[in-house]
Image: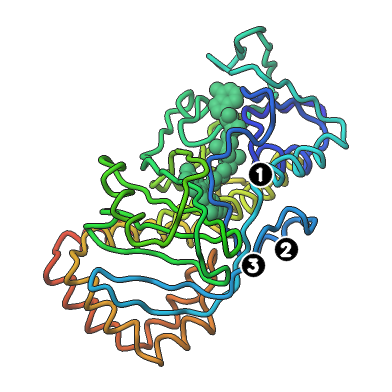
């Protein structure tokens, strides 16, 4: 590769991309990789197909999800997921990238960039013709702004609690009263510590207080906040500028999970940078984009459901037939596998009733299909 590659952002996706490329410059605003942590760190086993993870980074393995509906009833679904020590995970990817000919500039924020140069707080970096600039700089990407792509975002808040938790089960709380336009979560690190959070457009103190009142805890250990991109862009590159990870909204709008989908897209970007005939936008869409588009569509639909409709969904989803279908084919990243099977299920009548009540969903379907 003769041209230089500059990656703005040394988060997990920027570091993973650097590892694939082996020779680039990464500019990260923080002095310490992995901090501040702004994540719950829940991932599926799909992660292990992308990168081997040392055991000490995995804090817990959960066996099921319990979903609470507004009527207080819950459904248990079996399914494995892993709770990561996110700071250690980021540092592990950083170490892997550092073992190649990569150059990390830490503690410098990119403040401005154009086709010809990139200014950090401390230096100007010349961009020559043919050089590549990657925005792996998160939801408010400055590289994205430079090429006219911005992300709609939802603020998320999380506290770490000490208390009594079921270490084998993740809990999700749905409902207008709990977390309008998203959900609340309880992700156990073990039987004594859990990460509890939600994403809401505003009034997070109020909603978090309500969520915490449902839990058996003694102490708040720490808290964090971050932004989740709730958006979908089919094209995330322009000339020699490319976006990846949260900068490209390559996050599941349904759940906010973006680690694995970002890593998958980064692999496609590495191929495109190494081979100019490999079309990044076409290929990341093929590999994960259609599932992300589906996740975005589902988020739009869910956001229109009121509590009564969510409770109707409970009636449907609590049937043994639905549960076994979900447990057999559901995948935390590749939603389309499950949706294809769902078509054969009596969800059609539920969907039809919902669409009649919310004619605007027709617009979402149209947007999804085009
Ligand atoms: C509360 C919360 C919980 C989440 N939980 C999960 C979860 O359980 N599972 C999951 O898969 N995903 C989760 N996510 C999403 C996940 O954290 C992101 O998808 C993931 O971090 C994306 O990685 P990234 O490298 O693209 O971006 P980031 O992790 O945002 O990294 C971007 C990096 O770029 C740096 N940067 C930004 N601007 C500049 C600049 N101008 N100059 C230099 N550096 C810059 C930032 O400091 C940062 O280090 C969660 C997100 C939030 C907010």
Asked whether 26 or 125 is in front, the reply is 26
For the point 67% across and 60% down, the residue is: 47
For the point 47% across and 88% down, the residue is: 324
Asked if one can make out residue 250 in the rendered structure from this viewpoint, the answer is: no
Looking at the image, is mark 3 or mark 2 earlier in the sequence? 2
Quadrant of the image for the C terminus?
bottom left
Looking at the image, is mark 1 or mark 2 earlier in the sequence? 2
Label 1, label 2: how far apart the Cα atoms are: 17 Å
Left or right position of 91 against 289: right
Residue 63 circle label: none
Left or right position of 144 against 25: left
Residue 269 circle label: 1
Left or right position of 226 against 261: left
Q: Is 226 situated above or below 320? A: above
Asked whether 182 or 290 is in front, the reply is 182
Asked whether 87 or 112 is in front, the reply is 87
Q: Residues within 10 Å of mark 2 (few under 14, many from 20)?
A: few
Q: Residues within 10 Å of mark 1 (few under 14, many from 20)?
A: many
Left or right position of 369 against 11: left
Name the element at disc 1.
helix
Q: According to the image, label 2 marks what residue?
A: 49
Q: According to the image, label 3 marks what residue?
A: 61
For the point 35% across and 77% down, the residue is: 74
């Amino acid at each position: 590769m003769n041209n230089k590659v500059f990656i703005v952002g040394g988060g997990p996706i920027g570091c993973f991309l650097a590892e694939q490329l082996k020779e680039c410059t990464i500019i990260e605003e923080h002095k310490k990789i992995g901090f501040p942590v702004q994540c719950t760190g829940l991932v599926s086993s799909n992660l292990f197909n992308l990168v081997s993870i040392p055991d000490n980074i995995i804090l817990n393995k959960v066996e099921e999800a319990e979903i609470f509906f507004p009527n207080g009833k819950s459904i248990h679904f079996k399914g494995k997921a892993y709770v990561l020590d996110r700071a250690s995970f980021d540092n592990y990817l950083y170490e892997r990238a550092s073992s190649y000919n990569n150059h990390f500039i830490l503690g410098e924020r990119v403040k401005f960039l154009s086709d010809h140069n990139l200014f950090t707080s401390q230096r100007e970096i010349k961009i020559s013709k043919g050089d590549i600039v990657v925005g792996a700089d998160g939801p408010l990407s400055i590289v994205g702004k430079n090429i006219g792509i911005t992300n709609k975002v939802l603020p998320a808040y999380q506290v770490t609690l000490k208390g009594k938790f079921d270490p084998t089960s993740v809990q999700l709380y749905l409902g207008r009263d709990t977390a309008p336009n998203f959900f609340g979560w309880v992700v156990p690190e073990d039987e004594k510590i859990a990460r509890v959070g939600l994403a809401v457009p505003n009034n997070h103190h109020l909603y978090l207080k309500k969520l915490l009142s449902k839990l058996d805890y003694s102490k708040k250990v720490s808290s964090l906040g971050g932004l989740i991109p709730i958006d979908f862009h089919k094209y995330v590159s322009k000339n020699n500028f490319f976006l990846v990870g949260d900068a490209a909204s390559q996050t599941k709008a349904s759940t906010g999970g973006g680690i694995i989908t970002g890593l998958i897209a980064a692999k496609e970007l590495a191929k495109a940078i190494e081979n100019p005939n490999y079309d990044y936008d076409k290929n990341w869409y093929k590999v994960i984009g259609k599932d992300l588009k589906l996740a975005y569509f589902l988020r739009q639909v869910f956001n229109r459901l009121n509590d009564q409709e969510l409770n109707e969904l409970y009636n449907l989803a609590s049937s043994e037939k639905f549960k076994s279908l979900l447990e057999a084919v559901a995948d935390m990243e590749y939603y389309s596998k499950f949706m294809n099977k769902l078509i054969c299920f009596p969800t059609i009548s539920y969907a039809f009733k919902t669409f009649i009540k919310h004619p605007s969903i027709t617009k979402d379907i149209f947007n999804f299909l085009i």
